[in-house]
Image (cartoon, rainbow, N blue to C red):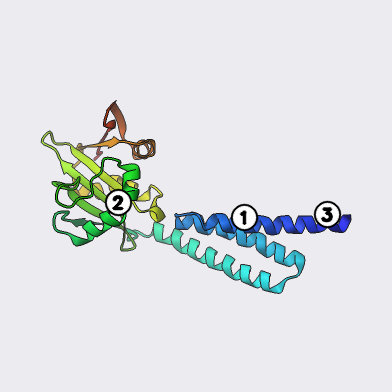
Amino acid sequence: MEEFQVNWVFESIGLLGSLLVALSMTMHHIKNLRIVNLFGCLAFGVYGILIGSFSVIVLNLFTLGANVYHLSKYRISQMHPGAFDILFKDPGSDEYIRRFVLFYAKDIKRFFPSFDPDSETGTLIGTECCFILRETMPVSLVAFRRENNGEISVVLDYAIPSYRDFKNGKFFFETAVSQIAGAGTVFAAVGEVPVHVSYLRKMGFRKIFDDEKGVHFRKEIKG
């Protein structure tokens, strides 16, 4: 009976490791994937020690080390001043924007249901566009329109799944925005779905009113 209880504890630790590794494989965000996978490998490593399996120990120690290495590299890259950058593009002629929008069209519409990806008649017509770069990789596309009243309407602020951690938006609205508008400029945005409404609040936007289009927000750029 006592041996059965000990084995049950061992197998529970192994099962926990399996569940964590399996869970990590369902995650889009690379950082979260590695964190969960790290704990899964740690549980598997302990399991390997308990059952005396050298192969299980070696495999999971290697994977654990790889996760620690990439997580530390990720953290350093975020602190590096050159990790973020902005690249302006012409939506009317840039082929990469067209391909980017078509590739992510289905996911974009989850956050911007009224978005029209058509390159000739769609949402981006008459806008200015820029990519937010992280270590030179385009991870977020922002499209905005300068209105006659002096405001700037943000019609698209989309981050690809692996880099959806709010840092792209913070970089744009706190740093890169100085290349677009001066202090006192008001940015406007409409949240069509709850997740986008929540994002705009995190970015410091203030709700003004709501109507059939969604929740209307404003944000004044500080000097």
Among the 4 quarters of the image, the one containing residue 147: top left
Which residue bears the numbered disc 3? Answer: 5
Mark 3 touches mark 2? (CB < 8 Å):
no
Q: Measured from the top left, where is residue 180 in percent x and y?
A: 19, 47
Instruction: Identify which amino acid the numbered label 3 is placed on.
Output: Gln
Q: Which of marks 2 and 1 is nearer the N terminus?
A: 1
Q: Which of 100 and 83 is in front in this view?
A: 100
Which residue bears the numbered disc 2? Answer: 105
Residue 19 got which mark?
A: 1
Image point 53% across, 68% down: which residue?
A: 66
Image point 26% across, 45% down: which residue?
A: 156
Q: How far apart are marks 3 and 1 (CA)?
A: 21 Å
Q: Residues within 10 Å of mark 3 (few under 14, many from 20)?
A: few
Q: Measured from the top left, where is residue 109 in percent x and y?
A: 31, 45
- Give the vertical position of 208 relative to 137 (above or below): above
Q: Nearer the viewer, residue 171 or 137?
A: 137
Instruction: Identify which amino acid the numbered label 2 is placed on.
Output: Ala
Quadrant including the N terminus: bottom right
Does dot 1 land on a helix, a strand or a loop? helix
Nearer the observer: mark 2 or 1; the answer is: 2
Quadrant including the C terminus: top left
Does dot 2 land on a helix, a strand or a loop? helix
Q: Can residue 171 be seen in this view?
A: no
